[in-house]
Amino acid sequence: MSDRLFFLLAVLAYGLSTVHAVLLWRKGFRRDDFVNYLLLLLGFTAHTVAVFQRGYLYNQCPVYNIYEATTFFTWFSVLAILVIGLWPRFRFLGAFAAPLLFAVGVFALMPWLDPPHGPKPEYSGGLRSLHAAVTLLAYGAFGLSCAAALMLVTQESNLKRHRLNALLSLLPPIARLEIAVRQLLFTGLVLLTVGLGSGLLYLAQNRASYPVGPDVKVIWSVLVWGGYLFLQFAHWRGWVRGRRLALAVIAAFGFVLLTFWGTNLLSPLHNPPPPPPAQS
Amino acid sequence: MSVVVIGLSHRTSPVEVREKFAFAEAEIPAAVTELRQRGLAEEAVILSTCNRVELYLATPQPPEQAFPALQHFLVTHHAYPDPVHDHLYQLAEPQSVEHLFKVACGLDSMVLGETEILGQLKQAYNLALQHKLTGARLNKAFQRAFHVAKHVRTTTNIQRGSISVASVAVELAERIFDTLAGHPVMIIGAGDTSEKTARALQSRGADRLVVTNRTREKAEALARELGGQAIGFDEWESEFARIDIAISSTSAPGYVIERTRLEALMKVRRHRPLLLIDIAVPRDVDPAVNGLDNVYLYNVDDLQGIANEYLQQRREEVARCETIIREKVRGLLAERRPAA
């Protein structure tokens, strides 16, 4: 079986998890959280095989094209969800993240996002690999922060509207969720800083190979980094807390999801022209 | 020999009658000895609580003969002068065992699903065991009752949720703050319900209490009792930056906490979450404050509403519990029958 087929199985499992998450939501997240966890675990198993098969094929971290980058960062996200989910109160994180995983997974499966490439990856060199891997891990952390923020908004709404579900649901307390959102946000920000820093360093070392001038992806990345930095600062200063922080985190990640691949495709830096054919 | 029950409870008689039939712990062994001497029981466990007095007996007599004699015993033992027919209930197998299981599960309690009765039942059984008042019949029945109670507790929602205003408030606080330790509580107005709520919060880890009242002496008295700190009524606003939970129960005719006032205080608090429990009638807290970010306001109706919903859920679980109990009773009685 090919790695893409394994990834398809993983996406199907995330789809089932999404359907189950809707049922859980309708029941007020009161029970059966373990079923959703198992579905994600099932998907993760297939996902792991897909990532490792592709990785062993090129003998490197598989982040050569958009398909590989997506499978890698979602794989990391599911791993983090499963680890965090070992704590029963946070087991529903998976139910909140499943729709995102499913949507991103379906998108990644589009055939044109996985063009064939030669046996030797063009992404070589430590800094370039570090840039790609760490940046994608950062977006994974922001995705998890978004899932925790969705949990916070749900629980906050239940409490504000005096619904019994606020007490019956197995979601963590507001304060604990806010800490989770903040910590995941911070982790994402640190990773993104390292990712962007290593990218800039790589660019400085290989200036001659890339087009000169402003690049849409670089501008976008700096904007995203600045936005997340501002969010972190605003929370630290007490300007945005609780629901506002959660909504800002959801909006920020929504923006990332909607614009990441578009800016990637428009970026000359991330789509360098093919090298001229060698003269015989 | 079969297991029978005779007794009275909050369902059949008022406290004035129940108290007349109560057994002190010290007199139970003598009472059972008397039952044995009269040939009414070979084994006995007497459960005497504020809500029920029940005799669980393994009697060698047919139940229809045993019951009048047992009734006579109860009346003469307590020298009760009035007719007791309306107050006493008497159950033979299988209803007697079913009743025992229901009592153990809290299904027959005044507060449906409460667990205190299980402890009292265990205490009564242990006392009987110590004095060698039980035998094979009652030992098996009681041990099975404790097992069934545990099973019902874990497989149904009969004990889930808080059904008092104070415990709902605690549960809400835990849904906002995770742990109550390190989250100071302010009591505005030294009322009875606010004291109960404060005690419930303390029992779950709240370690700092501030009490304020228009009458300083009352605040000091309550603060002393709760191990908290009393402050003047004009100082509560300045304390607000430090506290995370406020319980208000003053007799003020208007709002003590208004939206505009609290909005300014929330900035000082850097928008940390704040739980406001308003148990005053007329209300102390402007309902509009619930619209502020990170402020969670619950008044007495909200709390009572949640408690009632919990109670309703417990009631809905009764049928499930009874099915389990009937099945377990059948199992117990089948074990006794000799194999064909």
Image (spheres, rainbow, N blue to C red):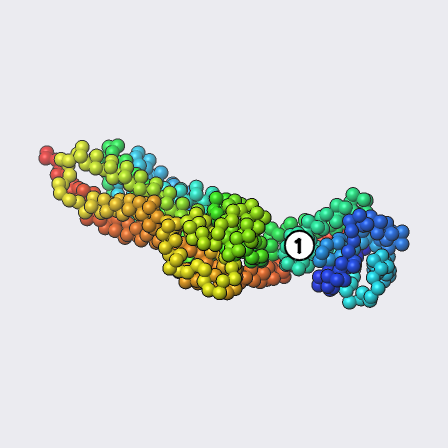
Residue in the picture at 42% in, 55% down: B295
Residue A41 sits in which quadrant? top left
The N terminus of chain A - image quarter: top left
Residue A154 location, x and y as percent? 42, 55
* In the depicted structure, whether residue B272 falls above or below residue B253: above
Left or right placement of residue A240 versus residue B319 in this view: left
Chain bearing tag 1 is B
Q: Which residue is mark 1?
A: B105
Circle 1 residues within 10 Å: few <14, some 14–19, many ≥20? many
In this view of the protein, which residue sits in the foreground, A263 or B249?
A: B249
> The residue under label 1 is which amino acid type?
Cys
* A92 sits left or right of A238 in the view: right
**Residue B313 shows up from this direction:** no
Viewer-proximal residue, A129 or A212? A212
Instruction: Determine whether B333 is above or below A211 in the image.
Output: below
Question: Where's residue B261, x and y in %?
Answer: 39, 58
- Quadrant location, the C terminus of chain A: top left
**Going by the image, does B18 lie left or right of A84?**
right
A70 is higher (above) or lower (below) than A122: below
Q: Is residue A182 visible?
A: yes
Residue in view at x 70 percent, y 50 percent:
B120
> In this view of the protein, which residue sits in the foreground, A195 or A16?
A195
- Which x, y percent locates residue B127? 77, 46
- Total labels: the figure holds 1
Q: Residue at x 72, y 54 (%)?
A: B49
Q: Which residue is depicted at the point 39% across and 49% down? A: B269
Q: Secondary structure at mark 1?
A: helix
The percent coordinates of residue A277 (x first, y second) are 13, 38
Q: Is residue A210 left or right of residue A159?
A: left
